Amino acid sequence: MDNLIALGAIPLRVEDSAGIKFVASDGLRNAVFVALQDKRIVGFDEKNKKELFAVDIPCSSDILGMHCMPELDSIVITCTDGTLLLLNMDEQSFEPVGDLEGGILCSSVSPDGELLLCLTATGTMIVFNSEWDVLVEKELGASERPAGDRPTVAWCADGLKFALLDTRASGKRFVSVFDRNCVLEAKSEDFEGVGSGLAFSPDGALIATSQQHSQRHDIIFFEPNALRHYEFTLPEHSASCSVSALQWNADGTLLSLCLRDVKRGSETLDALQIWRRSNYHWYLKYEVVSDAAGAPRHACACVWDESDPFSALLSVGSAGIERWTFDAEYQTSIAAQQPPDTSSASEQPPDLCVVASIDGQRLLLTPLGKMIVPPPMCAAAASFPAPITSLAWGPGGRLAVVTSDGSLHQCEPPFLNAAQAGWEVAPQIEALHALRARGKDLFQLAWASERLLLAVSEEGARLVPLILPSDKGSNEVLGSAKTAGAQDEKLPGGVRRLLRESGSGKCVAQLEDGSVVVLEEDPRTRTAAPASASSSSSSSPSSGLVQRRVGKLGAQCRWVALLPGGGVLGQTRRLKLLLGEEAVLEGVSSVCVHDRFLLCTSTANKLLILPLEGATQRKEGGWKEGWKGEEDARFVERGTVLVGAARGGHKVVLALPRGNLEVVMPRVLVLHTVCATLDKGEFEPALRLMRAQKVDMNLTHDHNPAAFLQALPTLVRQASPHLLSLLISALRPDDVTVSTYPNAPPPSSSALVPKAAPIVGGATVRKVDVVCDAMLAALEEVDNTKLLACKVLTFVRRDPPQVEAAVRSLQAQEQSVQEDGLEVLMGLVDSKVVFDAALGLYDLELAAVAAQVGGQDPREYVPMLERLSALPDRLCCYEIDVQLKRYASAVKHAVAAGAEEWERAWTLAETHGLYAAAVDALEGVEGRELHLRHALCGLGADLVAKGRAKEGGLALLGGGDAQGASAALLQAGDWEAAFALMQQHGAKSDDELQRVCYGAAEAMREAGDGRGAARVYLEYCKDVEEAVMALCEARGWVEAGRGAQRHG
């Protein structure tokens, strides 16, 4: 799905008036060698941009091949008459090194430059080493080939085997595979219509050639065992052409085709096509077409660089030799979108993140923010009259598409009305413009404003403005000197990268010195031409283009982004991530900006999510110090790269090495989306997302507690009953923004409410209880029986769970509603507890429903309920209370059942010590005074036994047991009240009272209360001597002396 971006084409100033026949390069010398039709060789130094030499070839026959041998610092020339010539590049002199009898049909040098393979007209295969010794000489046998037909040889990149494409006398061709020693390993069957081009993929997996049929032209592939593998078909306009050569790039990801005699209308042209394979589909990614008329007509050739897979020497038509540089990029509309503003985020349309993939004349469009369509399929496809070479996303999602015929197509934003028209509808072309020089000298197309596009000139030294005319039917040639205000502007050092950066969507350019400038149209004028780049911000009234310097990067970058707080990020082709002039990360294979995060894939097979905020402050230590927790990194498949991520969303689309797509949802982006959705008050989508991504729903409250409580009525109206049930069920006391999600974003400024727990009576109320109370209040305002289960849950989720209250809320409902509510309740509470709660409400019908929902055995609960229903109400309640071990309530119901049930009540009260319950039940009941006194006496005795003698004495007194009451009071130490009670009720004679008093005084003395004992001796026993002794024991010397004197 990624597109091939042509960064520039540097023409080599080689004298080629006679026409180019062969092209070779020497990477060690940075030199290019050209063999001309007039039998001359010209050498050119690419680094210093100067001609090295130009020498005539001393050969009387046609030149068959030119091969560079870096190890010998020489060039080998093979001629059809069998002559082998060696050109010494230092001395520019030729040396004959061989003469093969019968002439040479084809020749090729091994990738390591150590072997020269020649096939003679007599059918002999000869292999020379670098010393020109014959290593192998093998007879293949003479073959009667058609006149002018020659075999083709292609080496594998490791030099261990090669393929030979030869022709039978019948005209059919076949492929043979040999090892380095010319031992035949495999031979294919014969095929008709096979072309002369042959290419061996660098990994040795495929051998490519062409096959022409009556109605189509295919590129076919063979495996190393010479078995046919598969094929792809060339576009219809290339069906009648011939494929003169095929060439793989260094890493085998691109395949170039040199086409001759391509029919384009009434014109016959040469073309060079570059194809890329992905997910078992071949895409035509780029096409260079020759001029309609031009002299000389050079050989169509492509020589890929041995070290850089995106660099090649191209020769097409009359253009001569050019050094082309490419790059691969996923072009998504996200780069043309402005970052979301929290103040107006709700007004912005959703980012569809449309990815555009070039496939010849078709532009494949898929909105990744809406759907994921596995390539090569797509949501919609737009067709153009010629193969697409480049495209640019513009403001509002508009598209500018350049085709190989030199036309620029202005397209409306794709999927603009997809909701009504359908997602399969392709965007319409709004305007069609012609480009100067058929667009061949314009590269790196980018939008600067609604009406202005920018491009880089051929050598990257000039910035070319393309002003879109207001009249869409204008025949104006864009970029021509005749266009007012559209003159090219030469920038200091030249432009090396022009793009619409993925942060803010602005058009930026990186210059030769690493400076990054933002290019914007001057609103004061309607013309557009670049201003001088000498100042950090400048413009001129005649240019209409403003340059603003925003920073500098330490190396040339293929990707650039502007940070929100200032600063520039860039990714180099050496996989370094630069922050300004310093490298902060290494091994970064792809980069993407998503709202407040930077997404990266690394060569360590990880997807990294890094916050953009404060990046400049972390410059010294990079982002490594901020990598905390597993949410910031996740492992991905080796070779995975980023395609895009829709702004405001949480889905990240990745492209796997084989070409298919994978969607991941990193937890940090999910939290970011959830919190942003909650800030906007959109609870339904937030809850759905949390449910799908298994995010703790407590975040709904803990993100902004006060705002959540205020918005509960809105939440109840928005969310479905099922989501509300899940939310209530998930409640727990702790704050998940502290315990589980410490990196969750804080509330936005517009939604911020002071985050504090509610205070009642000076004590902090527990979170779960507060939410349940507020939720119940909000649910009560909505008349919806479907929310009954939610109401039930608000009781159960409290601490402790209020199961009985939850069951009580179901009493007045219909049976079907009761069943639903009980089913929810039993999902959180044991069914036996729920049944007991229903039974405890004395509602036998509800208890039966609870037993049925809980799956109890009818043989157990049906007889029990029938027996209970046959009893009187009070006795039924009594039996239920006894069964539930609610004995206090059972005593009350037994008392309420009448006097005849008193024995039942009294027995239960005595067994479980529930005298107080009996007393409470009997108080105020007429005709039950005897039972009340009985109960009070029992209560008093129980209190005395429990050490609460004074309270027991009062209860005994209320029950009419004065003697027991006085004994209890004495036991409690309240002798005044006890003696008064004895005297009042005449419970004792004087002698008995005196004995009791002596006993009480002795007990008080033993207990250490000597002063109290002295009072009892004096006031009740009239025993002064014992009183004095008691005071002395209590060290009350003064009182003892005074008492002794007073009483003699």
Image (tube, rainbow, N blue to C red):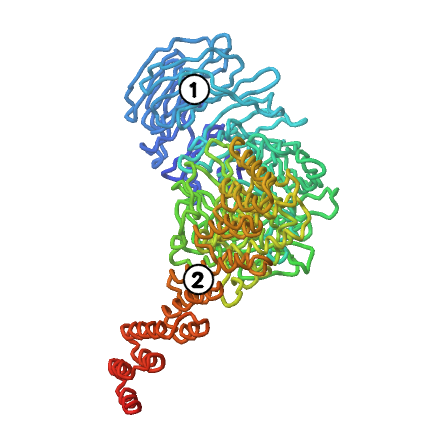
The residue lying at 47 percent from left, 47 percent from top is 885
Q: Quadrant of residue 25?
A: top left
Disc sitting over residue 905 in the figure = none
Residue at disc 2, secondary structure: helix
Q: Position of residue 463 (x, y in %)?
A: 57, 50
Whole-percent x, y for residue 912 in the image: 44, 51
Instruction: Quarter of the image for the C terminus: give it.
Output: bottom left
Callout 1: SS: loop
Task: Return the residue nearer the eye: 438 or 1016.
Answer: 1016
The residue lying at 51 percent from left, 10 percent from top is 171
Image quarter where the N terminus lies is top right
Q: 983 or 634: nearer the eye? A: 983
Q: Which mark is residue 223?
A: 1
> Taking 16 as reference, is 1006 left or right?
left
Residue 88 image point, x, y percent = 34, 33
Numbered circles on residues, count = 2
At label 2, the amino acid type is: Gly
**Residue labelled with disc 2:** 940
In whole angstroms, how far apart are the C-alphas of marks 1 and 2? 105 Å
326 or 718, which lies in front?
A: 718
Disc nearer the start of the sequence (1/2): 1
Q: Classify 138 as above or below 90.
A: above
Which class describes the residues within 10 Å of circle 2: few (<14), some (14-19), or many (20+)? many
